[in-house]
Amino acid sequence: MTTIKVQWPDGRSTVETIGQDWLKAARLAGIQIPTGCLGGSCGACEIDVNGAVVRACISTVPGSKSGQLMVDYATDPHW
Ligand code: FES
């Protein structure tokens, strides 16, 4: 399987390619993820993916056994 359904914070869902950069996937889906350093150190871009916080600027869309990823904004950004 090379694609996965992603549900975005605004309730819409899209089908994304596994391995795609999160920031690019979000932008194409019309979702604004805040960014800062773009290098993995500031935490501005943190999102919650199926309950785990990831830094979107250094992460890609993962596979999931459930075939679906629930994305939300991280509740405790560092800024
Ligand atoms: S933009 Fe700074 S950690 Fe992602």
Image: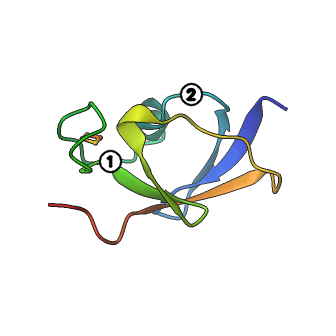
> What's the distance in space between the residues labelled 1 and 2, CA to CA?
15 Å
- Helix, strand or loop at mark 1: loop
**Is the CB of mark 2 within 8 Å of ligand 1?**
no
The 10 Å Cα crowd at callout 1, few under 14, some 14 to 19, many 20 or more, is some
- Scheme of colours in the image: rainbow
Residue ID for mark 2: 20
Residue drawn where x is 41% and y is 42% of the image: 56
Q: Quadrant of ligand 1?
A: top left
Instruction: Kindly tell me whether residue 54 is visible in this rendering.
Output: yes
Percent x, y of residue 9:
46, 62
Percent x, y of residue 12:
56, 57
Q: In which quadrant is the N terminus drawn?
A: top right
Residue drawn where x is 62% and y is 28% of the image: 19
Q: Which mark is residue 33?
A: 1
Which quadrant holds residue 62?
top right
- Helix, strand or loop at mark 2: loop
The 10 Å Cα crowd at callout 2, few under 14, some 14 to 19, many 20 or more, is some
Residue drawn where x is 35% and y is 53% of the image: 46
Which quadrant holds residue 20?
top right
Percent x, y of residue 48:
48, 60
